[in-house]
Amino acid sequence: KNQVEQSPQSLIILEGKNCTLQCNYTVSPFSNLRWYKQDTGRGPVSLTIMTFSENTKSNGRYTATLDADTKQSSLHITASQLSDSASYICVVSVYSGGGADGLTFGKGTHLIIQP
Amino acid sequence: NAGVMQNPRHLVRRRGQEARLRCSPMKGHSHVYWYRQLPEEGLKFMVYLQKENIIDESGMPKERFSAEFPKEGPSILRIQQVVRGDSAAYFCASSPPWGRANTEAFFGQGTRLTVV
């Protein structure tokens, strides 16, 4: 069964500090992995997307890594800001060959940045 | 490009009524996905549609729920005879045809359904 597990479930850090969120998946055949940020009451917004051959991808203060061998990904946030408070969702895409990639969502990590 | 538009943003229905949720995909996108998010839960896949076709409805409850994406107009998620357990946020995402591994899916702001 395709699954995406995220840890921790929730995290509280002080403004300016760094943090790392984890994502483990058992999805096959793997197509790509995405990290989304979901602000409270809003739709998810894409941060990064990585295919099998990509190990790392950055988007400003967000850096995602992917180890396709161990089926693990991490999202590192540098110099956190209050606006980083949100849920971060790991999504893994299954390649179906017919053009209809299925998406499996993790439950998200709820990040709170304190001043 | 206005992005994925969902309406209404908030919908209140009494038990037994019908709920209709609308999703207009981004311009040029022919694929639509519907997801449900219960409080404190992750996004759960419901249905994947292309124009005039349901591709995958494996996440849809067998009864009371239906979805369509007509040739013209928005995609509609319809819930008949709503019950309190249907209260959730319903998100729509759209994408162009999947031709590359890193094709992006964009989400709407969601419709929050409350059944009273």
Image: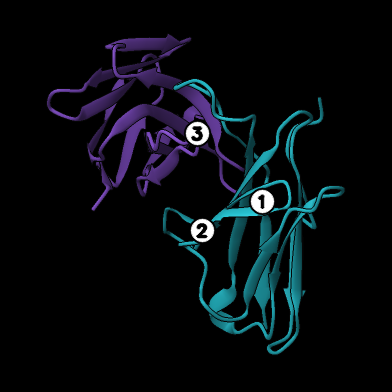
Residue B80 point in image, percent of width and height: 69, 81
Q: Nearer the viewer, residue B87 or A51?
A: A51
Q: Contact, CB < 8 Å: mark 2 with mark 1?
A: yes
Going from N to C along the chain, the mark reached first, 2 or 1, is: 2
Q: Amino acid at mark 3?
A: Gly
Crowd tier of the residue under label 1, counting other residues whose Cα lies within 10 Å: few below 14, some 14–19, many 20 or above: many
Q: In the image, which disc is placed on residue B10?
A: none
Q: Nearer the viewer, residue B11 or B29?
A: B29
Residue A20 point in image, percent of width and height: 27, 25
Identify the residue under disc 3.
A99
The residue tagged with tag 3: helix, strand or loop? loop
Q: Chain of mark 3?
A: A
Identify the coloring.
by chain
Identified at 43% across, 59% down, the residue is: B40
Residue A113 point in image, percent of width and height: 42, 32
Q: Colour of chain B?
A: cyan
Q: Is residue A42 visible?
A: no
Q: Contact, CB < 8 Å: mark 3 with mark 2?
A: no
Q: Amino acid at mark 1?
A: Gly
Q: CA distance from mark 1 to mark 3?
A: 25 Å
Identified at 77% across, 68% down, the residue is: B20
Nearest to viewer (mark 3 / mark 2): 3
Work out whether disc 2 and disc 1 sit on a shared chain.
yes
